[in-house]
Image (cartoon, rainbow, N blue to C red):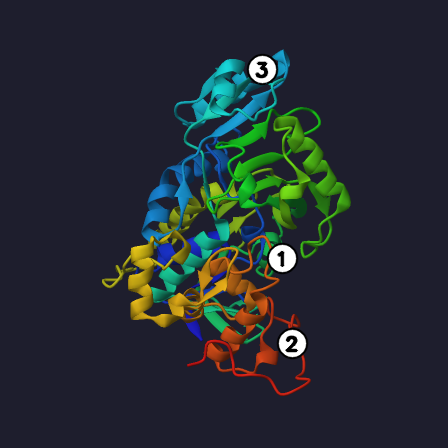
Amino acid sequence: MQFDVAVIGAGVIGALAARELSKYDIEVALLEKGNDIALGATKANSGIVHAGFDAEIGSNKAVMNVRGAALMESVCKELDVPYRNNGSLVLAFTTDDIGALEKLKEKGEKNGVKDLKILSAQELLTLEKNINENAVGALRAPTAGIVCPYELAIAATENAVSNGVEFIRNCEVFSIKDEGDIFTLLTSIGDIKAKYIVNAAGGYADKVAGMIGDNSIKLTARHGDYYLLDKTAGEIVAHTIFQCPTKMGKGALLSPTVDGNLIVGPSAVDIDDPCDTATTFEGLNFILKSVKKSVPTISERNIITSFSGNRAHSDTGDFILGKSEANSRFINAAGIESPGLSAAPAIAEYIESILKDEIKDIKLNQNYNPIRPEKVRFAHLNTKQRKALCAKNKAYGRIICRCETVTEGEIIDAIKSPAGAVDVDGVKRRTRAGMGRCQGGFCGSKVVEILARELSVPVNEITKFGGGSKIIYEKTKKGKKQYGKN
């Protein structure tokens, strides 16, 4: 296989970069070592679109954050991804905190963040009635927002594939050889050749760069635990709530999600293994204790799951973007920790600009369409719309996940979509089947059966997330007719 550009890593950076490159009449491959899209930091972060007041003035983080946040709403609209401009608040509990907020405000204004304002305690409590009454003020950033990070990555990949990009899953890169005007990538599925490489490999970007002799990137896996709360807690706050940074750190944030839940976290501990995503008692205990300083009414009874993720922290403290000094045909997008999600549309735009200048005689893709078709979200439809949909396709009349009101039709759509789901977690990320209060306890077996049927594979070959994560191993007795089969 030979391409003009190989993008390594199908997280939100790689996915959006591939989409940007699909605007041109070039051959692009999006390579992912896992079984699906968004398996690294993209599937396990806060989903916050930061305003950009926290990043150091003039840094890549600052520039890309502010630009990315400005682009986010339009990108999400094109890709039919839910986005909410809910704004953020940084709480102050002492007069020293107020001084720190003034400095954050000044930094944000120099970064180009608009409409920042220091609120009094009264103004704060008018906006957020559940905030700790001991708070003495807050910095408000109305340009901040929230988005579902993995849905954004999936949508960008689907749109990229629809525009000609080849998505190749289970494709781990082991080595890269420069043969003058082309790279040969030795991968788990064989050799892949590409004239240019975009390194969006997340926590492994330093290792991928090292394959071409670029040893300048030093990354540390920074582990963070999270709690997700039920939708009954989703309206405890309207804004994303931060604590004022101190010598002891930033504390934990809490925020509504675009799907109606409440997320709290993360902790921050450097670890050796970027694959280690096990939650820790210490981390979970820290975030619960910390977040109650902001909103004392948070209850453990509303917790429905916990999870963790690792972000790639660079020793420079900044995003590493641009052509590698070791090889100008190798483009780095490394060290993408917070505010990486916020910056993602701008980073993709920047990568596009580099390759547009590098590739000679590059032409536009005349068939490029930035619009991803609107997906069915049965839970959001009114009764009339539901009846009309079910009349066209009875599969939309069969509810599989009752917690989230997800239908069989939506699950089939997720499997058959470009770069579609091939495992249970893939269905979960695309449809929310299994993300409710019972966490898949009732719908999981039905999802397995639908996957097996639609993929035409034995039911015992369906996995949770690829690899050896089989859910069913062997039949013990003759089964009944497969669910939903007409």
C-alpha gap between disc 1 and disc 3? 46 Å
Q: Is residue 204 left or right of residue 342?
A: right
Instruction: Please identify the residue farthest to the top as the structure is shown.
Output: 95
Which of disc 1 and disc 2 is earlier in sequence?
A: 1
Can residue 417 be seen?
Answer: no
User: Would you say 423 lies left or right of 157 here?
Assistant: right
Indicate the quadrant where residue 467 lies: bottom right
| Tag 3: amino acid | Val
Farthest residue in the right direction?
282
Determine contact: label 3, label 2, CB under 8 Å.
no
According to the picture, the residue beneath numbered tag 3 turns out to be 136
Query: For this rendering, which residue is in front, 3 or 87?
Result: 87
Q: Quadrant of residue 463?
A: bottom right
Q: Position of residue 421 (x, y in %)?
A: 48, 67
Mark 3 residue crowding within 10 angstroms, few (<14) / some (14–19) / many (20+) = many
Q: Position of residue 258 (x, y in %)?
A: 46, 44
Q: CA distance from mark 3 to mark 2?
A: 55 Å
The amino acid at mark 1 is Lys
* Pointer 2 local density, CA inside 10 Å: few below 14, some 14–19, many at least 20: some
For label 1, the residue is 207
Sequence-first disc among 3 and 2: 3
Question: Quick one: 178 or 155, which is closer to the camera?
Answer: 155
Classify residue 204 by image quadrant: bottom right
Q: Which residue is mark 2?
A: 472
Find numbered disc 3 in the image and state the secondary structure of the residue it sits on: loop
For the residue pair 242 and 271, the one nearer the viewer reads as: 242
